[in-house]
Image (spheres, helix red, strand yellow):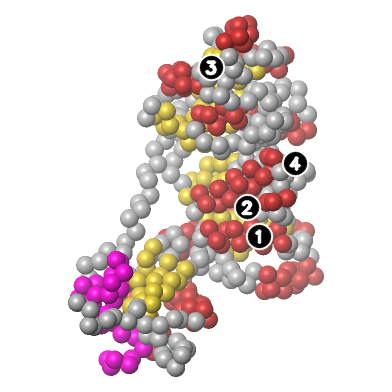
Amino acid sequence: MTEDSTFATTDTFAGDGTWTEESDWDGLDFEGEDADEEFVAVPTLAVVGRPNVGKSTLVNRIIGRREAVVEDVPGVTRDRVSYEANWSGRRFMVQDTGGWEPDAKGLQQSVARQAEQAMSTADAILLVVDAVVGATATDEAAARVLRRSKTPVILVANKVDDERTESEAAALWSLGLGEPRAVSATHGRGTGDLLDDVLAVLPETPREGTGTAGPRRVALVGKPNVGKSSLLNKLTGDERSVVHDVAGTTVDPVDSLVELGGKVWRFVDTAGLRKRVSHASGAEFYASLRTKGAIDAAEVAILLIDASEVISEQDLRVLSMVAEAGRALVIAFNKWDLVDEDRRGQLEREIDRDLMRVPWAQRVNVSAKTGRAVQRLVPALETSLASWDKRIPTGRLNTWLKEVVAATPPPMRGGRLPRIMFATQATTRPPTFVLFTTGFLEAGYRRFIERRLREEFNFDGSPVRISVRIREKRDRNRK
């Protein structure tokens, strides 16, 4: 091979920023060092109580970070939401719930059912009562239910901010659940002692059917009222998320273990993103942040788009968020039962125009309401994740790239033809390739390389990132 050839392997780029001889390359390891953490089943602590007693504030205090959405109005939390916690070296899940009321109607009735489901599946329960207000009829109804439960229950008297209100907490003995633990979730007062008591009653391992495993993490994302919660409920066969015809019912990300295609998946139902996060306020603003966090924590996202409506700016904003996070992607066109022939033709034109940045995404037409084709989500998810995890051996990559570049060299720049000296896959999740070159590669040529990579190695459903490292001229007089 001559010095002027487009593809050369005489010099390569070492990880410390210097160029080395090809013989030195063999000793370098480009395998990713981040291994998946082994997922061990842990017990679950459910936090229940009537609306606005400080459950979400207490959850944030227990997990040591602001995750649960908190606002000084009742009813902000509507679904049951799980967070990981660690106290004195022991890991467990904390499940926040919406306010429980025995005679709730409409949307609040669905919220109450979520709390009841949490109570029936948890390994231990915290019943939170506002010590300042005292025991209400709702608190007494909850206590009657929990006294019949075989699950350990700890009564928490919240909002005890100082010694003067401790006597008010003592009055809660009347609920028949034993000694009230006086705490202030806002200030942290008494929460350490409370967690010691929790560990004393929480089993080391979850009871059968309540533990978590190590499933792949799937985020359900989309604009408000597109059918995310309905799809999750259809997949689980359970009213796992609160569904209502009011847009924005989901506030927190809601996680569910779902068995599909013989595998267990962890689905996270997220709040619908509004047109502009800057226009959101209070709980809606924090819910938007939680949704972004859920996307970042997921491995693959299912973007739901209402097929019966025009693809909107909100849909494209969510799409951009998923793409920028580098997650595998399945686009599910929901409400397909409402799409007629005219709308199908219009939708195809919208896809060609608006979704051109993600032609690689897997696409499925579904109806969360009727269950149409929801089973097709599984192979789409599996294909996307297989691409997201894929690693191409360095030797095979360079052999292929040599042939591609020989057939279609990069465009000249400044009268010089840049040479691609070497290539390697630096990481997976998403697949990221580094090209070591003697000059700048135009964006169009990088897109060409990406397209050919996809054709050769089948990266369906996953983003592919390409980075270019340009070799600086070496000063041969430098010692």
> Which SS class for mark 1?
helix
Which corner quadrant holds the C terminus? bottom left
First in sequence, mark 3 or 4: give its number: 3
Q: Is residue 232 visible?
A: no
Mark 2 or 1, closer to the camera: 1
Residue 371 coordinates in the image, percent (x, y): 67, 51
Q: What numbered label is drawn on residue 221? A: 2
Distance from Cα at disc 4 to Cα at disc 2? 17 Å
Residue 121 coordinates in the image, percent (x, y): 54, 28
Residue 329 falls left or right of residue 192: right
- The type of residue carrying mark 3 is Ile
Mark 3 or 4, closer to the camera: 3
- The type of residue carrying mark 1 is Arg
Please, is residue 345 above or below residue 259 in the view? below
- The type of residue carrying mark 4 is His
**Residue 400 quadrant:** bottom left
Please, is residue 359 above or below residue 335 in the view? below
Distance from Cα at disc 3 to Cα at disc 4? 32 Å
Residue 373 falls left or right of residue 20: right
First in sequence, mark 4 or 1: give its number: 4
> Which SS class for mark 4?
loop
